[in-house]
Image (spheres, rainbow, N blue to C red):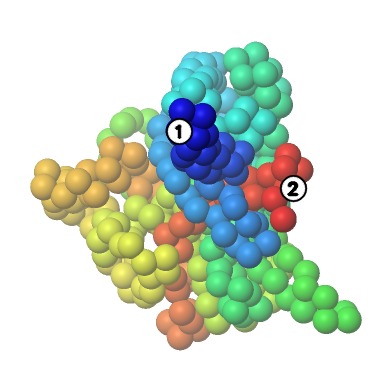
Amino acid sequence: MKNLKLYFTLVLLFFITPMLFSQENMFAGIEIGSKGIKMSIIDVYNIKKGNINVKSFWTENVAIAKSISIDGNMAPEDINRAITIINNNYNKIKTEMKVPDANIFIVASSGVAMAQNTQILANKVKAVTGKDLEFIEAHMEGKMLLKGCIPPVDYKNSIILDIGGGNTKGGYIDVVNNNAFVFFPLSLNYGSVTLTQSVIKQTRSEDLDEFNSRSFSFLPTLRDQVSAMYKSSPQALSKEKIYMSGGAVWAFYTLYKGVTKEPFNQFKLEDVINYDAILKNNFKKLEDLAKTDPEIEKVLKTYSQKYLISGSNILLVCLEALPDVNNKKLYFAKEGQIAWLISYIADRSKKVKKIY
């Protein structure tokens, strides 16, 4: 009888022990972005060797940054909606997914950090979760994007640009004195949401034709700012490979090329030009396709036509400003939407638990 009890105890330990260890290796991140709140669950079992497995990822939409371009602040109702989403998902991650509380991180993207009333958001996050909210600056976000979106073999010959809801950020690596690798950030204070709101401020109606007309009139301003972005780090213009990520680029690739499972997907400037024409002149085609294609439906539920047009304008201007762009290699980095967050969690996880 004793031996039988010992046998069952050992069997129980055999099955339970891996579960306990796996819970210790589970980490979660909640990112408050300009256009939505993203939740990531990752299994980190050897950071040094790059053994990180994305267990789950989902998004809930709330355009918390949409009023920043109007008065510099996040609207109280948008903050409250965001807090409800954060609280619900924070509790879900702890109770349903069994991620240890110490392994859950909550951050806000650089697009949200542009607001003047960030402390209100931080205080409300602290009140419902007990956690401090950290705001990621654009240059750090760009560095994390580069680490997560570009294959290491391409680091020296590439740039990354991420077109988010609140801003556009990225950068590149160059070799400087003593063969040291240095990261040079790129940033633009326009994303698909903030550019849309800036254009809407100049319109007198909800009419799409007027929006398109005002968007066209805004292009010189956008070009000047993109030109200034590249001039701030001019070596970006000489890079041969351009990796693009962010919601606006995901929307472009999904609507024009179709959903992809590949991490890196090549496209041409001509593809973006054609896509831009569809958005502005034949949007009904996409609405009809959405009735039978769930991926297209997902994009159109995430972004309005005006947001899509603004994102496309930023994408076009960023690409057209590159010399000899038709001979460069352009890639949509599919995992860009979670790359910087995964990089952040992986880095912070070392401070919580010695994994290697």
Looking at the image, residue 35 sits to the left or right of residue 350; the answer is left
Q: Residue 195: which numbered mark, if any? A: none
Depth check: 2 or 74 in front? 2
**Nearer to us: label 1 or label 2:** 1
Percent position of residue 272, x then y: 35, 66
Looking at the image, residue 350 sits to the left or right of residue 275; the answer is right
Q: Is residue 335 above or below residue 79?
A: below
Query: Which badge, 1 or 2, comes first in the chain's sequence?
Result: 1
Depth check: 304 or 334 in front? 334
The amino acid pointed to by label 2 is: Lys
Looking at the image, residue 202 sits to the left or right of residue 294; the answer is right
Looking at the image, residue 309 sits to the left or right of residue 8; the answer is left
* Residue located 63% across and 45% down the image: 345
* Residue located 43% across and 82% down the image: 326
* Residue located 78% across and 69% down the image: 182
Please tell me how crowded label 1 is: few (under 14), some (14-19), or many (20+) other residues with Cα within 10 Å. few
Percent position of residue 235, x then y: 69, 76
Q: Which residue is mark 1?
A: 4
Q: Which residue is mark 2?
A: 354
The amino acid pointed to by label 1 is: Leu
Instruction: Give SS at disc 1.
Output: helix
* Residue located 41% across and 39% down the image: 58
Depth check: 82 or 116 in front? 82
**Residue 264 appearing in the image:** yes
Q: CA distance from mark 1 to mark 2?
A: 37 Å
